[in-house]
Image (cartoon, rainbow, N blue to C red):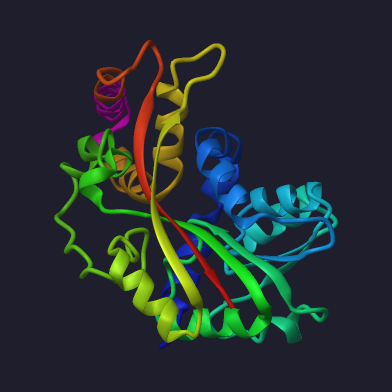
Amino acid sequence: MSNDGMRSTWTDVGAGWVEQEQTFDAAFAPITTALLAAAAIEPGHRVLDVGCGSGTLLEAAAASGATPVGVDISPTMVEAARRRVPVAEVLLADAQSTDLLAAAPGPAFDRVVSRFGVMFFADPVEAFTRIRTAAAPGGRLAFVCWRGDAENPIFTRGTEVLTRRLPPVERDPDGAPGPRAFADPDRVRTVLADAGWDRVAVKALDVALDYSTATSDGVEERLATILATGTGRDARARLEPELGAAAWTALLDEVRAELRATLVDGALQLPAATWLVTASA
């Protein structure tokens, strides 16, 4: 199965993620910390980051004395990662269909990591099989993926104010490529086992995503990420010209009010329910 649909999507939206890189990195910091602890990257390791985005994990791997290699299908994100981590080799490629060791010649990978980058494959078994063949015997896989909508208000809080004004969108079937593709832990285990990975472990990782800063409660920061990516980006493109400037501004004030109603001790903290997944090649 081709991954062309996701390639097109991320070519379009990658700029928004790069634009909001600092906000995402700050909010996702507890997830990144837990993921890196599970990966146990050591000096001298060769590390592959799948769906590397703008380079957060590549930067961490380099700081650990490892040799970082990233792969992503978004040209904008690949360019950003190359700027951010000049020592990293960053491939503009689809991990599902790429011979990773041929594309990035060198020793097999001691560690394979991903922060929300592996849920978008049209054929995840094929993708994880290719990734495993690029890993060294006994090499460790560690990634984080989202659980379901019901446990993750980040998918709905604030964004529903916008989606209520849009035409209904048919929900993707369970397991379809996208952020919630691995919400079912049994599916994660099956995909990895079918791809030849051993000692698969899927553990719940629950954290609070704190969007606040030293000078802000985080509402404006979260609003900016909503409008730069996904649903908010689509809503802005459609609704702002339809409604006109004044009505669009009023709608954004509704989003702000919904976010501000959930502040915790003056800070916007959204619960995040994820799976922390590890396995061995």
* Residue beneath the point at 45% across and 38% down: 225
Kindly report the secondary structure that dominates the magenta region of the rendered protein.
helix
* Residue beneath the point at 25% across and 18% down: 261
Q: Position of residue 34 (x, y in %)?
A: 54, 45
Q: Quadrant of residue 142?
A: bottom right
Q: Quadrant of residue 136?
A: bottom right
With 185 as the anchor, is 105 left or right in this view? right
With 116 as the anchor, is 90 left or right in this view? right
Q: Position of residue 160 (x, y in %)?
A: 21, 39
* Quadrant of the drawing holding the C terminus: bottom right
Q: Nearer the viewer, residue 152 or 187?
A: 187
* Residue beneath the point at 24% across and 24% down: 258
Q: Position of residue 174 (x, y in %)?
A: 22, 68
* Residue beneath the point at 43% across and 68% down: 120
Relative to residue 117, is residue 266 depicted above or below? Answer: above
Q: Nearer the viewer, residue 165 or 75?
A: 75
From this viewpoint, is residue 207 visible? yes
Q: Position of residue 151 (x, y in %)?
A: 25, 44
Q: Which residues are magenta?
A: 243-256
